Image: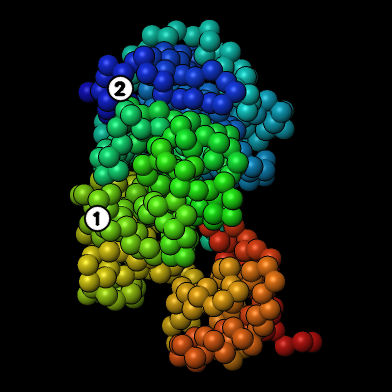
Amino acid sequence: MTNPLFQQIRDRIGTAADQIFLETPGASSLTFADLLAQSARVASALVAHGVSPGDRVAALAEKSPEALLLYLGTIRAGAIFLPLNPAFTDAELAYFLADAVPRLVVCDPARRDSLAEVATKANVAALLTLGADGRGSLTDAAAAASAEFADVARAPDDLAAILYTSGTTGRAKGAMLTHANLASNAESLAALWRLTSSDVLLHALPIYHTHGLFVAVNTLLFAAGRIIFLPRFDADECLRLMPRATVMMGVPTFYTRLLRHEGLTREACAAMRLFVSGSAPLLAESHRDWRERTGHAILERYGMTETNMTTSNPYDGERLAGSVGFPLPGVDLRITEPETAAILPRGEIGVIEVKGPNVFKGYWRNPEKTAAEFRPDGFFITGDLGRIDARGYVHIIGRATDLIITGGENVYPKEVEAEIDGLPGVVESAVVALPHADFGEAVTAFVVRAAGARLSEEDVRAAVERRLAKFKAPKRVIFLDELPRNAMGKVQKNVLRQAHRDLYAPSP
Ligand code: AMP
């Protein structure tokens, strides 16, 4: 038995040991040989600190090459990588640590003392440090450890990582991802997107999330390509480095910010081969604007923490704006009626269900939740609403929990948002349900106007009423300077619902 995920990475690195794998502006680069030696040192240090196969290693670390080596070292040690957003407070961490019970936690040196108490309460055996500059007791321990490490054998079905889902509703749950899940997805995407050792990826995503860690890093490792590793997204920096890159993976906000930058031109993108977008819906308008400005059709794909990537627009065929493309090879995707679970015909809107090697093993220590979200025939109920068009392209309509039921009628926010977004003077919109005494829920629109636009609430309502059934028109329209978004660019509808929950409450 081998270590399935790391063995595949080794096999694909093959004879490329002297090639650069990771380039960090302002720091020294890592070759694949460095990656092998340094991740071996990390694995040795983890084992020396008592990490055994199946133990969780929690990484609460800023983005750095060392944090990436911690991921790889954890996999090689046969342990389970548990990345956490370093922005979490100690109180939030108390929940994650108590739930995941990691053997070892890595955190920023500045947080060590305050976290020590939380870690002790959660029975964490070892607390090491790693700063954004790559320094800390983990790095010291790795430097002193052996660069020879025999990868710990694991079965394909053993866990490689637990990622807590963004949890915009309810408590965050740990999605258990196996070696086979991660390897199959990296293999599919590297092939589908034609990634090779000549590719250079511009990496500006966080690495505590599936997008930046697995979609971006694993696929490049599987292609033995190079990564330019940026601490965060910055439009100037991306444009400065773009002439040296061939691929960028981003959330839609990266694309809208770059579109606002005058430096985004065809010339700036001349060396680029592929732009990929995901994690949140890319506006069809951004897709069109990008094509006009750069000559490139952004390739949109869809997935979630629990399923890894599920669909992708084609590399060669039409990359359809507003669609997330076709299911990946080996992935079954169907649309079902939410109440009865009946499989719906093409064209109808329902819940997206997915089955395949990409789909996670279940929620960590939560068999009830796991059972509730899988059908008896093994399909995972994503909670996303979608439809498959006549050509087989999948379209995402939104989260099922965002569906509005007003006066007994179903309203899909996306349909209303599309009408509002199409109005002159509108940048973007978010349509949500707010409690209403008569209707149960009232369709409510939050709209960002373009600078200088004079659109009124009544203009928006009247325009929607002209195009859609009256019950779909927003009862109220509220103008905002910007929509609340999380780090992955997802609009936080729960924040809007919470902040405006009394909008229709009768005044006392
Ligand atoms: P996460 O688990 O944080 O990756 O969030 C996954 C969710 O993001 C999915 O269930 C979708 O609701 C949303 N999502 C991901 N990619 C897309 C996309 N291309 N278009 C629309 N929504 C997306």
From where the camera sits, is residue 309 visible?
Answer: yes
Q: 112 above or below 260? A: above
Answer with mark 2 or mark 1, whichever residue precedes in sequence: 2
Q: Callout 2, which amino acid?
A: Ile
- 367 to the left or right of 392: right
x, y percentage for residue 341? 28, 71
x, y percentage for residue 55? 44, 29
- Residue 17 versus residue 484: which sits nearer the camera? 17
In the structure shown, which secondary structural element does the residue marked by tag 2 occupy?
A: helix
Q: CA gap, disc 2 to disc 1?
A: 29 Å
- 396 to the left or right of 59: left
In the structure shown, which secondary structural element does the residue marked by tag 1 occupy?
A: loop
- Residue 176 versus residue 118: which sits nearer the camera? 176
The residue at the point 61 percent across, 38 percent down is: 86
User: What is the quadrant of the C terminus in the image?
Assistant: bottom right
| Residue position marked by numbered label 2 in the rendering | 13
Q: Residue furthest front?
A: 267
Q: Quadrant of residue 116?
A: top right
